[in-house]
Image: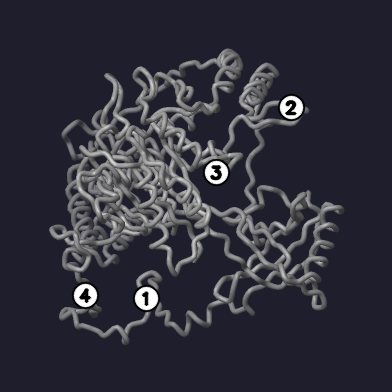
Amino acid sequence: CWCSALVLCMDVGFSMSNSAPGEEAPFEDAKKIIQKFVQRQVFAESKDELGLVLFGTDSTKNPLHQDGQYENITVFRQLMVPDFELLEEIQNQLQPENQQADWMDALVVSMDLLQTEIKGKKYDRLNIVLLTDLNIQASSDQLDIIIENLKKADITLQFFLPFPVGDKEESGGDGPISDPGHHGMGKGLSREQKEGLDMMKHIMLSLDEDDGLSQIYTFRLQLCMFKQIERRPMAWPCQLTVGSCLSIRIVGYKAVMQEKLKKTWKTVDAQSNRQEDVKRVTVYCLDDDNETEVQVDETIQGFRYGSDIVPFSKVDQEQMKYKHDGKCFAVLGFTKQNLVQRHQFIGNQVIKIFAAKDDEHAGVALSALIRALHELQMVAIVRYAYDRRCNPQIGAAFPCVKQQYECLMYIQLPFMEDLRQFSFPSLENNKKITPTDAQLTAVDSLIDSMMLVEEGDEEKPKDIFKPHHIPNPDFQRLFQCLHHRAVNPGTPLPPMEPWLKAILERPDVINERCQAPLEELKRVFPLTEVEKKKNVKTSAEIFGKDRPEISVFWLSRSVFHLERVRFSFPHLPFVSVLLSFMSPVQHLLLHLLSFVLVVVTLLSSSVCQQLIQRIEQLLSNRNTQYYMKSITGIQAFREQSVKVTHSFTLPCRQAGVRWLCEVMLR
């Protein structure tokens, strides 16, 4: 596979741990850059490989070490895809040491590592990044040979230094133009640093005369944001068909797609942290007393429908699937572009359609179609199916004509069944909320002041807020937390980084511009406190603080009053109010007592019959909870009936006693 190979070569020698009072040592800045390099590669899910070479180490571990050469240089990590293990090793094991090593020798070891590891593989880029303060005498004996080998192997080179490098070269003079706020300055550069700078500039200009010095950076370079997740474009070959006669060979590429993180969680043993120590055994059993075990082959999928389970076998599943002929990009018709509204765009991707590279006739035919659509301001309505496994879609293919290329851009559209028509009452007919002219003007001014574009050069609008330059804050924060949890397990998550919080804030221009419209908005839309006309009584005020029982006298008066105004009991509004303050038992008790009071007060046998039907409904539910509620209700029915009156009419009393006896016997 085609990918790039990068070797990070870092100076961990004695001089890298020296710093001026109040400044951080160059080693710490270089370590942060190394961590950011690795983090960006890990979270970008890139297949690029990375190696790490340290020089200035107390020990020596490299394949070129022999006869006292290439000493104090260690190959810390061979060339491989970076992972969390490397991040943890850099965090815990990368420390400043007490030796010094020639950075030219370290460069040779890095070149050897690249040449050895890439044998038999294909890489589209080879790169070495060298981080050092140049504060050691470097040998220039093999300088021309090293430059020749770098060119021959097509290896690019980058330097990171603790001080800035000026534009003009000076040999033996005052050194590069520098900023006293950077590391390693003191009273100026040492003799070793000046000589090292001359050698470094010679190497970079030999590799690239024009932009060689632009590849020299300082430790102050902020690799603050993580790289975007890298996705290599995959070609989707197909046939664009117009009717049954015209067919054009095309290739599609995803231009824009909603990126979603792969959230994969692994279950590991709590003590060993190993996935292999956790074993799962799945057993299927019947829902009977013995829990009889059933083989997997004897089971099928089922869906619950009410109290029944409807079986759904694999045969049914295959028959229900929509079958089509496979990948497809068929033009169904054409329409004006203004008839395809932007709010109708659905899906999570945009696909660019090009003609096949090796087919000249296809290029001419597709170009003619694109040009015709562009001139007529029309779009093609197409039927799109990625492959046989995917359901077909309907979408619009817009013409896109650029100076460098031309193509069709496919965007998915909804089917008729996907659209929902909602009707809302008009706001214009409500006189209470009709805005005044001053209020409308204030809202318009606020909208204008918060526009994210302004006039640029040649009267072209210029974006103030540039989303293309802003990384996904969701991903950035997640990557930061994942890295922290990997290298610092058991510690609280860090706060959001200041740079990430800053890019999510409104631009200062917008803040200044919208202050006056906001003040005007407050003036024309004053807020007044609305006093409640009637205090709402709480359940404690109605029923008493610690009394679960309900006042029978109050209920009876409520029933009398509500019956006089001819409310039907199932729809009594006071019942709905009470129910919102009551427990389930009190809820049922209120229903039953209210029924009893209506019976006693109105001497109505029909209401008594309604009460019987309601409790029988509760008994028909085969659930212990409903049985207990029914028994509680029956007891309350009897007790409250006796308390309120002893003057039941004979038909009602006989019916009620007979029914109570039957229910109790059940």
| Measured Cα–Cα span from mark 4 to mark 2 | 69 Å
Mark 4: amino acid: Val
Disc number lying in front (1 or 2): 2
Q: Nearer the viewer, residue 32 or 167?
A: 167
Mark 3: amino acid: Ser
Question: Along the polypeptide, which appears first: circle 4 or circle 2?
Answer: 4
Q: Is 640 placed left or right of 2 in the picture? A: left
Mark 2 highlights which residue?
457
| Measured Cα–Cα span from mark 3 to mark 4 | 65 Å
Numbered tag placed on residue 206 in the rendering: 3
Disc number lying in front (3 or 4): 3
Disc number lying in front (4 or 2): 2
Percent coordinates x, y for residue 528 in the rendering = 49, 16
Decide: is 146 above or below 533: below
Mark 1 highlights which residue?
309
Mark 4 highlights which residue?
281
How crowded is the residue under tag 2: few (<14 C-alpha within 10 Å), some, or many (20+)? few
Mark 2: amino acid: Asp
Decide: is 358 above or below 223: below
Under circle 4, the secondary element is loop
Disc number lying in front (1 or 3): 3
Residue drawn at point x = 35 percent, y = 52 percent: 109
Way the structure is coloured: one colour
| Measured Cα–Cα span from mark 1 to mark 3 | 78 Å
